[in-house]
Structure formats: structure tokens, C-alpha cells
Amino acid sequence: MHRAALLLIFLALLLLWSAAAAKIIVEPGPAELPTDGINVDDERFVPVWQAYSPLEFLTIVLLIHCPLLAVPFEIICSTGVLAFLGYRTSRHPLDNKKRSRIYACIRDHPGITPTEIARATGINRGTTRYHLSRLREAGLVSAVNRDGRVGYFRRGYDATSKTICCHLRNNTRREILALLLEEPGVTQSEVADTIGVARSTVAWHMRRLVADGLVGANRDGRTVRYALTSRTLHVL
């Protein structure tokens, strides 16, 4: 009984839905298009080969099928940017005012130490050491460590010249070298009497000059006489 009632209700709903679906709605048609050959809007279709030049069309097709062709352009742009940045950061080392002052001090006082440079230029020691490292990186100056004393030289000095300049920074050795230049063949006693220092002091400095090959010792019986070597005379 219940099944029959449900079946009748289902059939009734189906008939009602079919009748509603069978209705035809008639709407007025659009107005006729004008007959003067002009479209309603101004749009028109143009073939792609007419919209672009042959070179532009070929470029578009190549980039669609091979995007990697755009990589050289990116490389060129990147190279240009890097070249510009490199130009901005590759200024001459002496364009810096403090660095230029330090370089001028080394040029005028070969063998000068960092402490002496800081004192002469009025630049603090930390800044002086920084600029010295930059000058060394640029190959404009070099450093020589002699007996724990670091002396700086501008480019162009040979090893003998650097050694002589380092010794000339010491007052006693400078006087000894000057005396040997004027009076070769003097003894330690004569050197001590002439420059006014103890003989032991002369012996200590003379050993250093002989060890570096700047002074030669020649024995004359029981007496040792000292003179400048040929390479020292050539430089001086």
C-alpha cells in the first residue's frame, strides 16, 4: 500500500516537471545588422604576420620555442652592470687623501716604520696600518722586516737599497756608514772616537752591518779594518 502511494507521487512529480520543461519561451530577436558594410564595433582581426615585422615575428617564434635564447641578453645586461660597479669600485688607490699622504711619506722617507708614518702624517695608527695594507695589495709599497723593525718602501727599491735604508734609519749606524764612506779602512776604536760612542756599541752595530753585507772586515795583522762593500758603494 505504501509502495503504491509512493509510486503514484513519483509519477505525478515527473509529469509536472516534464510539462514545465516543455514550455517554449519566445524572445524578440536582435535588430538587423546595418547593410552599409560597417560593423557594429571597430574591432577587426589582423593576421599576426601583418601585425609584426618579419624580424619581430621571427624573434617571438624563436623565444616561444627556445626561451634559452634570451640568456645572452641577460648575460650582456649583467656584464654591463658588473662593469659599471667595477668601474665605481676600481678607483686608483691614491685617490684616497689619507692614503696619498701615507704614500708620499714613504716616498720621502724610505724605510720608515708604521709608527713613524702615523707620527709624521698625524693619522692614527689603526688607520695607518689599514691604508698600508691597501697600498701593499695594490703593489705600490713593500715592507722589510729588519731586526724586528718593519720598514716600508715604495715600488722600485732593490734588496740592497732597502737594507741600506733600514740601517740609515738608525742614527749610530748612519754615522758609521758616513764615516766609512769618507775614511775607508778605519778600526772600531777609530770609529768609536770619531762618532763619540763606546767601542762595544760600535762593535754591536758593526756586526750587523757586516752580517748584511754592507761592510767588509779586513784583518791587518792584529788590527781589523772596516770598509764599505762594492755593492754598498754602488748604491750610496
Image (spheres, rainbow, N blue to C red):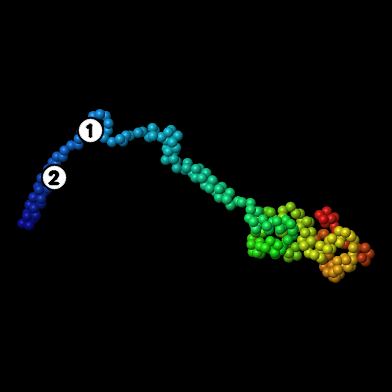
Q: Secondary structure at mark 2?
A: helix
C-alpha separation, residue under disc 1 versus residue under disc 2: 33 Å
For label 2, count other residues whose C-alpha is less than 10 Å away and answer few (under 14), some (14-19) or many (20+).
few
Q: How many numbered discs sit on the rendered protein?
A: 2
Tag 2: residue type? Answer: Ala
Q: Quadrant of residue 162?
A: bottom right
Q: Is residue 189 shown above or below 156?
A: below
| Residue located at (16% from left, 39% from top) | 27
**Secondary structure under badge 1?**
loop
Q: In the rendering, which numbered label is found on residue 88?
A: none
Q: Position of residue 133 (x, y in %)?
A: 65, 59
Query: In this view of the protein, which residue sits in the foreground, 48 or 222?
Result: 48
Please state which of residues 120 and 13 is positioned toward the viewer in this rendering. Answer: 120
Q: Is residue 138 left or right of residue 83?
A: right
- In the image shown, does 4 or 62 lie closer to the viewer? 62
Determine whether, in the image, residue 219 is placed left or right of residue 123: right
Task: List the residue tagged with mark 1.
Answer: 33
| Residue 83, placed above or below residue 197 | above
Quadrant where the image shows the N terminus: bottom left
Percent x, y for residue 223?
Answer: 92, 65
Q: Nearer the viewer, residue 71 or 232?
A: 232
What residue is at 33 percent from the left and 34 percent from the top?
45
Question: Label 1 amino acid?
Answer: Leu
CA neighbours of label 1 inside 10 A, class few (<14), some (14 to 19), many (20+): few
Tell me which corner region of the image, top left, top right, bottom left or bottom right, holds residue 49.
top left
Position in image of residue 97 (x %, y %): 64, 56
**Residue topped by disc 2:** 21
